[in-house]
Image: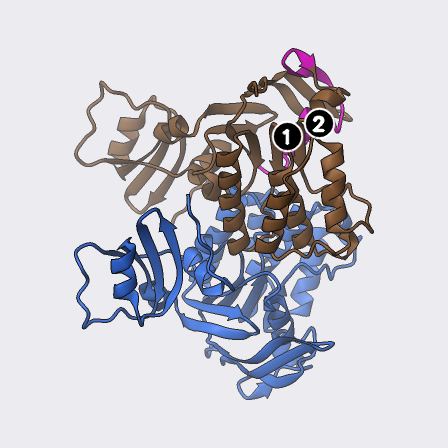
Chain colours: A blue, B brown
Amino acid sequence: MAKPKPIKINQVSKDFAKQQVLNNIDLTIEPETIYGLLGRNGAGKSTLFNIITNRIPLSGGEVTIGGQTVTDNDDVLNRIYLMSEANLYPSRMRVKEIFKLTTQLYRGMDMRLAQTLAEQFELNTDTRFNKLSTGSRSIMKLIIALAVDVDYVFLDEPTLGLDANHRRLFYNALLDSYAKRPRSFVISTHLIEEVSNLIERVWVLQNHQIIVDDTTENVLNKGFAITGPAADVEAYTAGLNVIGHEALGNLRVQYVYGELDGDRPIPDTISTSHIDLQRLFIYLTNQEVVTVEN
Amino acid sequence: MAKPKPIKINQVSKDFAKQQVLNNIDLTIEPETIYGLLGRNGAGKSTLFNIITNRIPLSGGEVTIGGQTVTDNDDVLNRIYLMSEANLYPSRMRVKEIFKLTTQLYRGMDMRLAQTLAEQFELNTDTRFNKLSTGSRSIMKLIIALAVDVDYVFLDEPTLGLDANHRRLFYNALLDSYAKRPRSFVISTHLIEEVSNLIERVWVLQNHQIIVDDTTENVLNKGFAITGPAADVEAYTAGLNVIGHEALGNLRVQYVYGELDGDRPIPDTISTSHIDLQRLFIYLTNQEVVTVEN
């Protein structure tokens, strides 16, 4: 089977009423790659997902796959699945009937995997959709997302409200499913640290634009905490891309995103270390620097 | 000011219809202590909170504070605040009016702190409650929970739906507020790893009962991962309290909760390490052992 073509998001913009939500977004979704779409609440992540999957119209730009526009193109859209908060199923339909419906709406579904996952998540497939708890609805959608035969899966806050056991089960099931049938996943989540080992590439959406589009490895390599006496830390980080700081008495931590200056020797009084993805995200997207003094 | 008396939960049970939700719960909430109430979805955490704060009746047992029963005792109840998903406010009331109402319903509220937090969380206090997004409603309730003058604060999934920045702001604000005015917090959350540095004592609710009631330090000291060749690991952990395992080819990890056997020498082929609170919780509360083989 030939590899699917990448999805190209070209100069996509979106306004609601007079409010701009997305401003000239350029992204490429390569086949067989796992992405993390990170952004503050209200940053426009769901809007971007809805545009890529043709659920809402865009205000400018285009989304294409292999040169074909995605808009209203069923041949293309049945290779793309979006799991979101929206409940699109007939409310009295049973879970197992929804699984069957999905096989018809897309190119098919791995019913054995769906059944196994339903057992692991303790989801009764005889239950009607309108009798499921909020948590069970999320689980049903997650199972469909992992079992449906598509090339691109978009997951909008897939683990919201799930307990730690079910989140872990989902992450493991996703990696397992990916290993058996590589395809692309784009995951939008606020639980950044929990997905940092899953995602190969990081996108950060902030102020209507993509401010980070890089491999997870590169992003982590660019994040530094520089710690030491305030005067030394400030002198050393002058001219670097400082994205935040903390003060603890006389000690200062400055967070830097980017390269350190190779020509500038690091004084003995200062220590440098890398920081985790969630903390890096927080500093990159804080409108103002949060100072914690205890 | 005299220290408040502890809240005693004595043999509390709760049935809904014919279903048992809580079975003989015994707990003590000491003053000026931060607790984590951990449990799977549906374990009965919200029910326990609702009983302690007298929002629903109990089926058996009693909740007392300083010998007085909490049930229908306004003198006692205005020293206890529960932040939950329930929306108890007049829908057209503005945020700042809800703050004022709170000062009347309880013994008061730190309005300066509430205003500062509203600014930090970017919550407009002129907005009417029914115009707030779900996220903003949570933020409003969090602010009240941190500013209201009570001795006991119960927080039911306080950070659900909050982005990483707002979660961090909340954790810092809680610690800051606790340092200035020590009181008791009981936090129920699925984001266990994020609160593990906050909570002094851990409660785990499972199968309608409390299965762990210990200091966070003790709980962490009792959790072990024993890794090595399968035969050696199984021989060494025989008779210990094994709560889970993972297999990776020939290698085996067994998770143990409790003391290791001091008399039994650890073979050179085996390594032991501690595990984090979230992972420990997952193994303690999994009905069956999840095996991940890649």
Amino acid type indicated by mark 1:
Val
Can see residue B58?
no
A127 above or below B256?
below
Residue drawn 34% across the image and 46% down it:
A249
Residue drawn 78% across the image and 53% down it:
B130
A267 above or below B213?
below
Between residues B118 and A48, which one lies in front from this camera angle?
Answer: B118
* Residue A27 left/right relative to A20: left
Disc 2 vs disc 1: Cβ atoms closer than 8 Å? yes
Q: Residues within 10 Å of mark 1 (few under 14, many from 20)?
A: many
Does the magenta run of residues contain B63?
yes
The residue singled out by tag 1 in the image is B150
Does the magenta run of residues contain B228?
no
Mark 1 element type: loop
A143 above or below B20?
below
Chain of the residue that carries numbered disc 2 in the rendered image: B
Q: Percent from the top left, x then y, of residue A208?
A: 57, 74
Chain of the residue that carries numbered disc 1 in the rendered image: B
Tag shown at residue A248: none
The Cα–Cα distance between marks 2 and 1, rounded to whole angstroms, is 7 Å
Between residues A288 and B233, which one lies in front from this camera angle?
Answer: A288
Amino acid type indicated by mark 2:
Asn
Q: Percent from the top left, x then y, of residue A75?
A: 63, 80
Mark 2 element type: loop
* Residue A90 left/right relative to A282: right
Magenta stretch in the rendered image: B40-68
Query: Which image quadrant is residue A82 in?
Result: bottom right
